């Protein structure tokens, strides 16, 4: 008994256990994962620094604040104000969230709770396959089918509800903010739906059974028990979808109208940061100032994405503290 006691260290682990050499894979894994984590952060920092250096020419010419907030993008006169591009990016992304997230969460709830078991697998695959469709296909479909079909409806809505802010317009053009937001909503639907479905599937069965046992209807159980429990994951899924919407290029370029002016209606034409880079980068090769302005647009897009995700993380952490549930992993999405 005494000999066995001597073989045990103060921490409760055997002294005559595994050899130091056998622990080398664990150390290598730890150091390797640490190095990869640091490399990711270093890569993000490199992207930011590189974009900032390449954008220096237009910032020196226009000024940082003037470039971001000036409402004048005129390549012919070498005037670069990116406010119409920033506003177009925010409007289309907001419309995508407004249209896409409720539908995606509703589909996730249907597949999780209401769909017959025999159809659940097939419908899940069909929804997930939407993410495999190339963005150019969505853009062409919207241009040749969606725009002609929805233009009369958009004109009726603009004429009927012209008293609402950001709605009134004389004549609705074909490509516009609304169509771009609708296409983006369709594109982010499979991402938000897939993550929301996985989060809703983690709701404890005893929580749902207790709610039904108290006399709640199925809808009341979903609204009171499931959605609050899965709220954090749904917000995270929405932010991933928002990242897809902010950075989408080809589909938006086809259906937004490519007009570098500040639109005053959701049915007006506009531009986005990603679309202007895709459209004008080739012709900017011979013009250093124009090229610098487009790289600066990429920098603004980079900062905008980080800012949106930071705000979302703060909102999730705040909601978790208010609900009293612990924040795993420090509240990251």
Image (tube, rainbow, N blue to C red):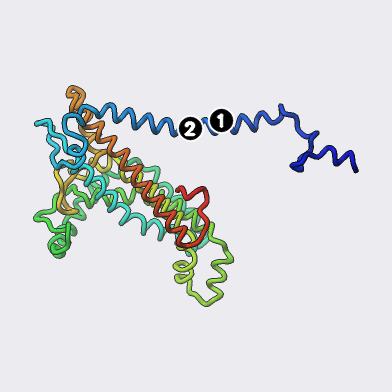
- Place residue 210 in its image quadrant: bottom right
Residue 66 bears which disc, if any? none
- Secondary structure at numbered mark 1: helix
- The 10 Å Cα crowd at callout 2, few under 14, some 14 to 19, many 20 or more, is few
The percent position of residue 32, horizontal first and vertical second, equals 56, 30
Viewer-nearest residue: 218 or 264: 264
Measure the C-alpha gap from mark 1 to mark 2: 10 Å
Q: Please name the residue shown 29% across and 35% down the image.
A: 299
Residue underneath mark 2: 38
| Relative height, residue 21 to residue 313 (above, below) | above
Q: Is residue 230 left or right of 47 when viewed as pictured?
A: right
The percent position of residue 222, horizontal first and vertical second, equals 47, 67
- Place residue 12 in its image quadrant: top right
Residue underneath mark 1: 32
Q: Residue furthest bottom?
A: 215
Viewer-nearest residue: 72 or 160: 72
């Amino acid at each position: 008994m005494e000999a066995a006691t001597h073989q045990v260290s103060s921490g409760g682990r055997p002294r005559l256990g595994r050899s130091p050499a056998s622990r080398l894979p664990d150390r290598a894994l730890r150091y390797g994962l640490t190095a990869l984590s640091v490399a990711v952060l270093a890569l993000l920092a490199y992207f930011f620094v590189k974009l900032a250096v390449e954008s220096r020419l237009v910032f020196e010419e226009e000024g940082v604040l003037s470039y971001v907030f000036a409402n004048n993008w005129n390549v012919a006169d070498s005037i670069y104000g990116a406010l119409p591009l920033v506003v177009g990016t925010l409007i289309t992304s907001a419309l995508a969230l407004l249209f896409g997230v409720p539908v995606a969460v509703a589909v996730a709830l249907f597949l999780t709770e209401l769909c017959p078991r025999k159809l659940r697998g097939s419908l899940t695959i069909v929804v997930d396959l939407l993410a495999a469709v190339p963005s150019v296909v969505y853009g062409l479909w919207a241009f040749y089918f969606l725009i002609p079909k929805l233009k009369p409806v958009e004109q009726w809505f603009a004429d009927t509800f012209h008293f609402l802010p950001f709605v009134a317009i004389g004549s609705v053009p074909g490509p516009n903010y609304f169509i771009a937001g609708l296409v983006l909503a369709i594109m982010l639907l499979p991402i938000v739906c897939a993550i929301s479905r996985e989060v809703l599937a983690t709701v404890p069965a005893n929580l749902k059974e207790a709610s039904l046992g108290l006399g709640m209807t199925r809808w009341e159980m979903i609204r009171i028990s499931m959605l609050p429990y899965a709220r954090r994951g749904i917000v995270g899924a929405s932010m991933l979808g928002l990242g897809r919407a902010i950075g989408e290029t080809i589909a938006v370029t086809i259906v937004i109208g490519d007009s570098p002016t500040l639109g005053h209606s959701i049915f007006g034409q506009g531009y986005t940061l990603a679309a202007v880079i895709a459209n004008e980068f080739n012709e900017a090769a011979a013009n250093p100032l124009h090229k610098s302005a487009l790289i600066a647009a990429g920098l603004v897009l980079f900062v905008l994405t980080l800012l949106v995700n930071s705000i979302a993380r703060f909102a999730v952490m705040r909601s978790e503290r208010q609900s009293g549930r612990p924040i795993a992993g420090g509240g990251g999405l």
